[in-house]
Image (cartoon, grey):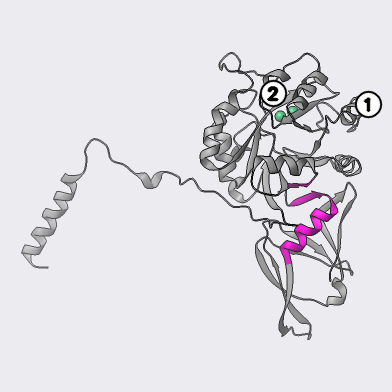
Amino acid sequence: MNLKLLFITILSAGMTCMAQDMNNVQFPHMQKTSARKEIRIPNILGFQTLKCDFHMHTIFSDGVVWPTVRVTEAWEEGLDAIAITDHIENNPSKKFVTGDHNASFDIAISEADEKNIILIHAGEVTRDMPPGHLNALFLNDVNPLDTASPIDALMAAKKQGAFIIWNHPGWKAQQPDTCLWMPMHQELFEKGLINGIEVFNEQEYYPVVLDWCLNRKIAVISNSDIHDVTAHFYDIENGKHRPMTLVFAKDRSQQSIKEAMFENRTLAYFDNKLAGKKELLEAIFKASVSASPTGKTDGENRELYEVSNISAIPFIVENMKGQTVTVPAESTIVLPLNLADYQELTIRNCYTGSNSVLHVNMP
Ligand SMILES: [Zn+2]
Ligand SMILES: [Zn+2]
């Protein structure tokens, strides 16, 4: 480098320094980019598969977050629809926040519209057992549900066309030993005041409730009931997810979600497990997993197949000899398959009852 060039280099370096704003320097690369993690679960039977969480809290009951945070979390975690369900009868923050039972919905709705998250207007009727806690969804106004008797609250919800979910029936604080369907639940059910029941809640599973739902044709529901920030409670960064309800809807709209729920087209999804009606489980499995011959053989002259899973749910598949293989999510594996052993499959992580799993016949 000649002296003249060195001089120019030093001068321009000096000028770069001088050009720096001495009052406010921005480091935008330090800010996290808000990104949505898509959950790929195929559409089935002509319906769209929507990922929903119908149970969560904000500071307008005993949650710790502002309502708009629930929308951002849902968007980032790949959900399509949520219901904010603050307790009607329990608001420990009342001293610090004002607002009626519609406040959390009113605050979150514009954020939801902007992010294309379907926000369902809802509230949680919070009573001793029986009947326990029930979420009323698709309300216009939560305030009329603030009544002395729980039946009156649910009747007020029904008047607005609500879909009513019995929450966490096996929660040990209310049913310490056995999860019971009590006479009052029978009465509510007969009055059309129990339309869905949570099979998964927060980090719990109630196997007996899956049987209740299937025997009585009640929609299976899986909800987070999150009070904390979701990423504080669930290990989202490491690929874990909150409980969610898969709703099979005609289109991605609130009206179609409601219709699908009343028509019992839901599956409960949590911890890589699916629970619900056999037809829906079978359709999801068959739309997700496929096998095709590679035309090659292994060292023992067995035909090799590519087995692909296009969904976010890994499937644990057992063949007729009791051999088990996990087909990982959104992956392809190569396996030697003797097709005769795979005419009937048992899908270990698809629950069709408290004590039964999905069996599928392969064509
Ligand atoms: Zn509850
Ligand atoms: Zn709750």
> Any magenta on residue 270?
yes
Q: Are marks 2 and 1 in contact (CB under 8 Å)?
A: no
Point out the image quarter for the N terminus: bottom left
Q: Is residue 212 above or below residue 356?
A: above
Q: Which mark is residue 144?
A: none
Q: Determine whether the residue tagged by mark 2 lies in a helix, strand or loop.
A: loop
Residue that sits furthest to the right in the current view: 183
Q: Is residue 343 above or below residue 279?
A: below
Residue 189 position within the rendered picture, expressed as x and y whole percent measured from the top left? 88, 31
Q: Amino acid at mark 1?
A: Pro
| Residue 96 visible somewhere in the drawing | yes
- Cα distance in 3D space between marks 2 and 1: 24 Å
Residue bearing mark 1: 183
Residue bearing mark 2: 87
| Residue 64 visible somewhere in the drawing | no
- How crowded pointer 1 is (Cα within 10 Å; few <14, some 14-19, many 20+) is rated as few
Q: Amino acid at mark 2?
A: His
Instruction: Tell me: is circle 2 under 8 Å from ligand 2.
Output: yes
Question: Is residue 318 left or right of 118 when viewed as pictured?
Answer: right
Considering depth in this image, is 251 or 348 the residue closer to the camera? 251
> Any magenta on residue 53?
no
The residue at the point 64 percent across, 43 percent down is 253
Point out the image quarter for the C terminus: bottom right
- How crowded pointer 2 is (Cα within 10 Å; few <14, some 14-19, many 20+) is rated as many
The residue at the point 63 percent across, 27 percent down is 63
Magenta stretch in the rendered image? 265-289
State which quadrant residue 324 falls in. bottom right
Residue 241 position within the rendered picture, expressed as x and y whole percent measured from the top left? 66, 46
State which quadrant residue 176 falls in. top right
Q: Quadrant of ligand 1?
A: top right
The residue at the point 65 percent across, 19 percent down is 91
